[in-house]
Image: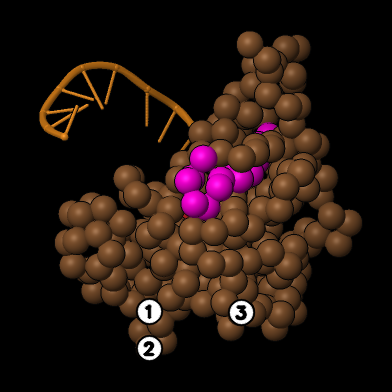
Chain colours: A brown, B red, C orange
DNA sequence: GCGACAG
DNA sequence: ATCTTGTCGC
């Protein structure tokens, strides 16, 4: 069987911040460019791309994957991966600085338009209103949404038990996202607008991308692929010494 | 000051 | 994110 395309190399942008204070300053500058009005792609048309990242902390390695799906059929159209060194620690609120260099490299390796980018994490549901999905959208100009598995620092009433039921995700006062039931009687996911897509559309896209499981097909494909890419890099390329 | 905290 | 066996259920 033929091997997958070789992973792209992860390179850290020259202007990438090296400190937490620097990262917060970048967020405060870029967040002014977030657009939450654009309608974004129509649900079920064009493409939707899942991005995800896996780590090998012991080796300081990160692997990212971008998987493009046909939004109508949810069939895989193209896959790309990127592998390289981790360049930022995990700090709650600064996840984008850890994940984006690898994710951007994987997106760059695609030959087809990504369409809507679905991120594992948050968009504007973020302490500074500039989470991973918003950051990615502003840097690339792509429409992006965040679908997270945990409520982070936000709160919500439990949504009804049926698929599609939803309640506001708030910081106490303002709605920053939605707790959305994608499967009956299963823990909800946490959807927020990233860039170029309003919250209601982000919710509609998420429901369309979750015909069977709790998490979007985009996320499921990207998750599996980045783990495979990391494994291949560890017990292949840089594994023997 | 202490604890919580997307992945 | 990651460390990890078996097990219940469609």
Q: Are marks 3 and 2 in contact (CB under 8 Å)?
A: no
- Say which residue label 2 marks: A173
Task: Please name which of the two marks, 3 or 2, marks the residue nearer to the observer.
Answer: 3
Is A42 left, or right, of B3 in this rendering?
A: right
Query: How many residues crowd around disc 3 within 10 Å: few (fewer than 14), some, or many (20 or more)?
Result: few
The earlier-in-sequence mark between 3 and 2 is 3
**In whole angstroms, how far apart are the C-alphas of marks 2 and 1?**
6 Å
Disc 1 target residue: A170
Q: Which residues are magenta?
A: A61-75
Question: Mark 1, mark 3: which one is toward the viewer?
Answer: 3
Q: Which badge, 1 or 3, comes first in the chain's sequence?
A: 3
Q: Chain of mark 3?
A: A
Q: Residue furthest bottom?
A: A173
| Residue at x 19% of width, y 61% of height | A162
What is the secondary structure assignment of the residue under circle 1? strand
Same-chain check, marks 1 and 3: yes
Residue shown at 71% from the left, 80% from the top = A33
Q: Residues within 10 Å of mark 1 (few under 14, many from 20)?
A: some
Q: Position of residue A108 (x, y in %)?
A: 78, 48
């Amino acid at each position: 069987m033929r091997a997958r395309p070789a992973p792209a190399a992860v390179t850290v942008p020259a202007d990438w911040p090296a400190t937490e204070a620097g990262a917060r300053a970048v967020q405060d500058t870029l967040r002014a460019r977030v657009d939450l009005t654009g309608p974004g792609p129509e649900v079920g048309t064009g493409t939707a791309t899942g991005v995800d990242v896996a780590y090998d902390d012991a080796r300081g390695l990160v692997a990212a994957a971008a998987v493009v799906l046909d939004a109508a059929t949810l069939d895989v159209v193209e896959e790309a991966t990127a592998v390289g060194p981790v360049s930022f620690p995990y700090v709650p609120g600064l996840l984008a600085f850890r994940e984006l260099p690898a994710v951007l490299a994987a997106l760059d390796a695609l030959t087809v338009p990504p369409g809507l980018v679905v991120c594992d994490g948050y968009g504007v549901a973020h302490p500074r209103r500039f989470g991973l999905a918003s950051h990615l959208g502003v840097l690339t100009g792509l429409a992006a949404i965040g679908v997270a598995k945990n409520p982070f620092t936000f709160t919500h009433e439990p949504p009804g038990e049926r698929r599609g039921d939803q309640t506001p995700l708030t910081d106490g006062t303002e709605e920053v996202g939605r707790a959305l039931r994608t499967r009956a009687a299963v823990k909800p996911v946490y959807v927020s607008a990233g860039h170029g897509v309003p919250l209601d559309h982000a919710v509609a896209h998420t429901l369309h991308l979750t015909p069977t499981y709790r998490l979007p097909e985009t996320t499921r494909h990207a998750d599996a692929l980045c783990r495979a890419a990391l494994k291949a890099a560890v017990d292949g390329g840089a594994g023997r010494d």
